[in-house]
Image: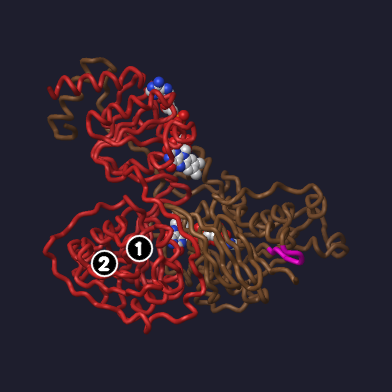
Amino acid sequence: MNNVFVYCEIEEGQVADVSLELLTKGRKLADDLKCELEAIVIGADLKGVEKQIMPYGVDTVWIASDKRLYPYTTLPHTAIIVKLFGDEKPQVALMGATSIGRDLGPRVSSALHSGLTADCTSLIIGDHEDKKNNKVYKDLLYQIRPAFGGNIVATIINPDCRPQMATVREGVMKKEIRSEAYKGKVKQLDVEKYVSAEDFVVKVIERHMEASKVNIKNAGIIIAGGYGVGSKENFDKLYELADVIGAEVGASRAAVDAGYAAHERQIGQTGVTVRPKLYIACGISGQIQHTAGMEESSMVIAINTDKNAPINNFADYVITGDIADVIPKMIKQYKENTK
Amino acid sequence: MKGLKIVVLAKQVPDTRNVGKDAMKADGTVNRAVLPAIFNPEDLNALEQALRLKDKYAGTEVTLLTMGPGRAAEIIREGLYRGADNGILLSDRAFAGSDTLATSYALSCTLKKMGKIDIIIAGRQAIDGDTAQVGPQVAEKLGFPQITYAEDIVSAEKGKIVIKRRLERGIEIVEGTLPMVVTVNASAPECRPRNAKYVMKYKHARAVSEMQDASEDYTLLHNNRPYLNIGEWSVNDIETKAEELGLTGSPTKVKAIENVVFQAKEAKVLEPTDADMGELMKELIANHTIG
Ligand SMILES: Cc1cc2nc3c(=O)[nH]c(=O)nc-3n(C[C@H](O)[C@H](O)[C@H](O)COP(=O)(O)OP(=O)(O)OC[C@H]3O[C@@H](n4cnc5c(N)ncnc54)[C@H](O)[C@@H]3O)c2cc1C
Ligand SMILES: Cc1cc2nc3c(=O)[nH]c(=O)nc-3n(C[C@H](O)[C@H](O)[C@H](O)COP(=O)(O)OP(=O)(O)OC[C@H]3O[C@@H](n4cnc5c(N)ncnc54)[C@H](O)[C@@H]3O)c2cc1C
């Protein structure tokens, strides 16, 4: 009772990365709150799924397996979670800010009358003093999120309603196994007791999903090109550097719009959020919609002809110069220094 | 066939996409006064889906519903110019400070009062609050099923609705029953422009609170042409529980808001020379960042 719950999304029998990232965060929150971490998986043919989940430090895995529960549709998944949360009364519940989590989360929060905070970038435990009512709340979930198109960051709390629900985008939290040998319990749910025939009014007739091909969000080093790279040919130089130092290539929206790079490489508010150990921004001005997706990089190198480019405010190293000149020099110097 | 009854949920939002330097006040709050108020972009995509159904199924009626201050009637007028049949402005101090749950509660109480509805179409997400929660929360409160992330409402006939959804990693075609709540993505077709004929017809359409603030007297005009009255409802026109409204009815509270400020860190400035690039590479290799 009163534990931290994570809803685990399933695609092709695999637990989604975003869910594993949330389990990692959930474990940390459960440690801070001195409670247990529980996971709920809903789908079809889920035999053995707990093996993917428990190593993240999960104490109880709830499994609802029924062939009608995959692919995801809103009502049956909502019905299961609403009843389970009603019985188990979690204090915190986390979901991915994905097309599933953002369909399911608000539905569940509406049914339970609990607050839901969308797209959090940070979740921490803290106290809150309600001065007006002279009340102190201990150990609330601070849900920190950008709003207003990324122009402000708000800290949201749910003082009175439970669970405190939040969604988080893929790639925002780190994914880290607690222990391969972590032992938790598995509880199978009797699906018939949770869903009714009317919950299946929406049917998926056709489905075409593609696994995303490039994986910039897990890359340790990212070389991101912007409009200032100037051409698709110049982008090839970025790939060359990426090859040499073992990096992935990302892009700003202006570079994607100009056709220099594919959309799946876009970093920022309407692309992916990345947090590599090294981010090399090449010919990127550093507009807020872009920096929203890279500002948590551990180290940033900015290469720009404009010595006052806003991106330089995020940089640990500022190189004022032309991409076409700087990148080949970097390649050459890397090779010489690793010989 | 007797046509569909469709309600489009639309929100007036500050244009957060082109935020200038003066958009933030010194205390870190948003200076709404300098941001143009616009029709939430995805709600225009939603309106277009509704108008396409109206084109396709004779007798279909499209009503806009917006909750906001008196000024929000502007977007109802905008919707009328593009082909909507009528609109309701839900406006009351009692709704101030609503989070998504209290917003969806107020909207759902209004929708219940509006009689039988076949399809409620919302935008996926508003560009100010950025949560994408109101559509599904309204659906739950009405006990309607929902189909989110719609790109195309393919058909809505004989009590069935077929929708193409655009998800992060692909598409789905789904079929459901009416009534239904649908939320529409920006990837759906853009909204048609204003129609000159409708602009002429509705340019004097006003909601009550707009008329109070206006210098002109619309009374006579509106008495002669009732369609120029934009319906305006207050909390007294719908059945609500006070504890579910506004700030009191909102489980989420904003504890703190920060303006996103650029804090310049101490950066090392390098020249684009072989010598400096060599130093950089040595440093990165030495501290295990690369290599
Ligand atoms: C709702 C919304 C969402 C958005 N989402 C995103 C998003 O997810 N991701 C994103 O990136 N953007 C996003 N944008 C767009 C964003 O506002 C900027 O327009 C975009 O990031 C600019 O890209 P850029 O820096 O590559 O181009 P520019 O702003 O054109 O900058 C080019 C830079 O290159 C430099 N330069 C030029 N030539 C050279 C050279 N030869 N060598 C070195 N430097 C050179 C210039 O000095 C300049 O600083 C969004 C915008 C909106 C409104
Ligand atoms: C900084 C900040 C952060 C916030 N964070 C949260 C949060 O995490 N959780 C939370 O519950 N609330 C939050 N709120 C409150 C929330 O923004 C408001 O409740 C808002 O009225 C509705 O949410 P939205 O703008 O996100 O709409 P969305 O849920 O993104 O809107 C989806 C669709 O619902 C319809 N719709 C939404 N509002 C209306 C309306 N007034 N009239 C008619 N149709 C409408 C439109 O079709 C719209 O496209 C936040 C507010 C601020 C200022």
Residues beneath discs 2 and 1 located on the same chain = yes
Q: Which chain is brown?
A: B
Q: Judge whether residue A288 can be spotted in this image.
A: no
Q: Is residue B87 above or below residue B200?
A: below
Q: Residue drawn 33% across and 60% down? A: A12
**Residue A95 numbered mark, or none:** 1
- Which residue type carries mark 1? Met
The reply to whether residue A304 is visible in this rendering is: yes
Indicate the quadrant containing the C terminus of chain B: top left, top right, bottom left or bottom right.
top left
Tell me which corner region of the image, top left, top right, bottom left or bottom right, holds residue A336.
Answer: top left
Image coords of residue A214 (percent x, y): 34, 42
Q: Amino acid at mark 2?
A: Asp
SS for dot 1 = strand
Gap in angstroms between the C-alphas marked 2 and 1: 20 Å
In the foreground, A223 or A14: A14
Image coordinates for residue B56, horizontal then vertical, percent: 71, 60
Numbered disc in front, either 2 or 1:
1
Q: How is the image coloured?
A: by chain
Q: Residues within 10 Å of mark 2 (few under 14, many from 20)?
A: some
What residue is disc 2 on?
A: A139
Q: Colour of chain A?
A: red
Residue B164 location (% of width, % of height)? 54, 58
For the record, the magenta segment spans B57-63
User: 10 Å neighbourhood of mark 1: few (<14), some, or many (≥20)?
Assistant: many
Q: Is there a contact, CB below 8 Å, between mark 2 and mark 1?
A: no
Q: Quadrant of residue A284?
A: top left
